[in-house]
Image (cartoon, rainbow, N blue to C red):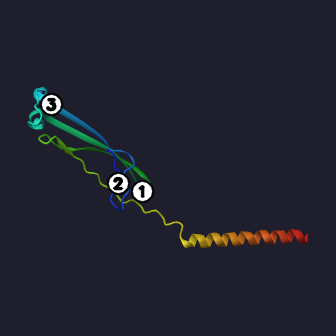
Amino acid sequence: MKETKAPAGYRPLKTPITLTVTPTFTTDRDSYVKGNGATEDTLQKLEASAHIESFYDGLLGKEDQNLSTDVEDGSMNLTVINKVGKKLPVTGTSAVLILLTAGAAMMTGAVVKGRKKREEL
């Protein structure tokens, strides 16, 4: 299962969640008639687990969860906790432009001064 969109302000999981589902059926499984509540008649046991990998704040987290299941519905419940993680620094502000301009002016001045010294020699 892959998270395609995270809630606003959260980061999505990059690695798909691996689900393992192990159903145990009765011998009446083969005599199932469509629409007759087959899940509760044929499913004896339902086991499910999930392997979740997450990457937050520079740390890789791996977690295995045993999921709660409902044999009557044939359903399972998976809870994924999204984390905000650290915010990235703001880049490309006007301060960067000012620093680049000042650095370029200083380098231009150094080149001009170096050429004048060479001409004097």
Query: At label 2, which amino acid type do we have?
Result: Lys
Q: Is residue 19 above or below residue 32?
A: below
Q: Crowdedness of circle 3 by 10 Å Cα count: few (<14), some, many (20+)?
A: some
Residue 66: which quarter of the image?
top left
Q: Which residue is mark 3?
A: 25
Closer to the chain start, of discs 3 and 1, is: 3
Location of the N terminus (image quadrant): top left
Q: Nearer the viewer, residue 30 or 14?
A: 30
At which x and y percent is residue 41? 8, 34
Residue 57: give its label: 1
Query: At label 3, which amino acid type do we have?
Result: Phe
Q: Which residue is mark 2?
A: 5
Rounded to the nearest whole Å, what is the CA distance between mark 2 and mark 1?
19 Å
Front tag of 3 and 1: 3
At which x and y percent is residue 2? 34, 46
Residue 30: which quarter of the image?
top left
Identity of the residue furthest to the front in this view: 34
> Which residue corresponds to the image point at 83% horizontal and 69% vertical from the top-left?
115
**Element under label 2?**
loop
At which x and y percent is residue 89? 48, 65
